[in-house]
Image (cartoon, rainbow, N blue to C red):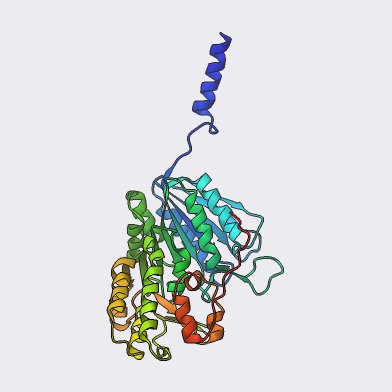
Amino acid sequence: MKKIYLCFIFLFFVVVSPSFAQQKQYDWTVIYVMSYDNNLNFAADPINKGLKKGLINDNVAVTVLMDRTDRNGLKRIVMTDKDQKESTLKTDDITKPKVLSDYLSWVHKTLPAKKYALVFLNHGGRLDQMCHDQYPDKRSRRGEWMSAHKTGPVIRQWKKKLGQSQLSFLFLQQCGRGSLENIYNFRETADYVMASQLVVGAPNTYYEKTLKTLCKEPKLGGKELGLAIMNNDLHYTTYVLLNGREIKNAKPQLNALVKDVLDQAKSLLKRPLPLSHCFDIGDEFNDDLKQFVQALYSINKLKSKTQLKSFVNWYEKTLIVEHRFSRPRYQQRLSWTGLSTYRGSSKKLFQRYSFLAIYTDTLWGRLQQTLNGASITKAKKKKRFF
């Protein structure tokens, strides 16, 4: 009789107790990193409102790591169709790799899903800058930036822990992050990566409609999610959606292109004249990638363009899944093709970022070195936080 009673108690806890219950797996968990501890603080409330209104069933969950101007710690928000919960972290610095790593690990444990989407909101700064935190601590007055060079490895390490789940979509929803040099930081992260080579508006208009679509059609993939955002957003000029699995192939493509240029250039390699800049900040500017490589062949009078055509074909038909302007008149007036490239027009400006993977891993660095008379700096190994 005692054994029967103990079995009954055990079954009660297995069936009824939450600690024994199987945790729900969502079809999608959409993750936002909202670094609005700056002049974009106004945009946080309408974005969160749109996200919550878009959750019309339990197929999708949303979480936001939010930093605002209150200096009271980062907020960790969880939204479902049923409720919204918020907790406060001890740190107020959203730029540190460990903060992002810990947050992503917490998301995987708390909101497990078949597919994940990761979106970074905020300003885009200089080449390696994303997510500006004006007041990362109570003493700081000048602010800090998240480093794209350091963020890419954090996401790759997290992706390895997802098991059968997928990081289906990564969106750099920030101005000017659609550059070759920046995108290469996020190779082997998501199935699809989206960004813009131009300025992006705020707060953007896609949240509610896009999440409703995802709730109704949870089997959609990262490509469809990116296209839905393009369809529903009004606050942008141009977005580019990339095949995330092809980003790593920029290495052999660039190596073949640069080798061809250097082999054909029998005299001093000439730098293309300044083109129509996509995104400028301070003393840094970016030209359209396709226009730049075409101009490189043209100004140096390189006769054989076989390798150039091969690169452009890969760029337009394999790497880029969709390149879209928000309004037809923009497409008629603007000649940009999806991705930009950093024009380090002096030794000093190139040397500033010579540690980036695009320069140390590929011959693109050798090309810039030749054009600028600079050298490549191998990045020092640093302590990992994951």
Work out whether 299 lies above or below 123: below
Where residue 336 appears, as percent x and y from the top left, is: 34, 79
| Residue extending furthest toward the right | 139
Q: Visible in this render: residue 203?
A: no
Q: Nearer the viewer, residue 29 or 83?
A: 29
Q: Give the total of numbered labels.
A: 0
Q: Nearer the viewer, residue 193 or 364?
A: 364
Q: Nearer the viewer, residue 101 or 184?
A: 184
Judge from the rendering whether residue 217 lies leftward or rightward of residue 128; answer left or right.
left
The quarter of the rendered structure image containing the C terminus is bottom right
Rendering quarter of residue 139: bottom right
Q: Visible in this render: residue 139?
A: yes
Judge from the rendering whether residue 309 lies leftward or rightward of residue 265; answer left or right.
left
Rendering quarter of residue 91: bottom right
Report the residue at 63% width, 72% height from top.
143
The quarter of the rendered structure image containing the N terminus is top right
Work out whether 38 lies above or below 348: above
| Residue extending furthest toward the top | 1
Work out whether 273 lies above or below 261: below
Work out whether 307 lies above or below 163: below
Judge from the rendering whether residue 142 lies leftward or rightward of residue 317; answer left or right.
right
Report the residue at 59% width, 64% height from top.
95
Where residue 216 appears, as percent x and y from the top left, is: 33, 49
Where residue 119 appears, as percent x and y from the top left, is: 46, 61
Where residue 352 appears, as percent x and y from the top left, is: 56, 79
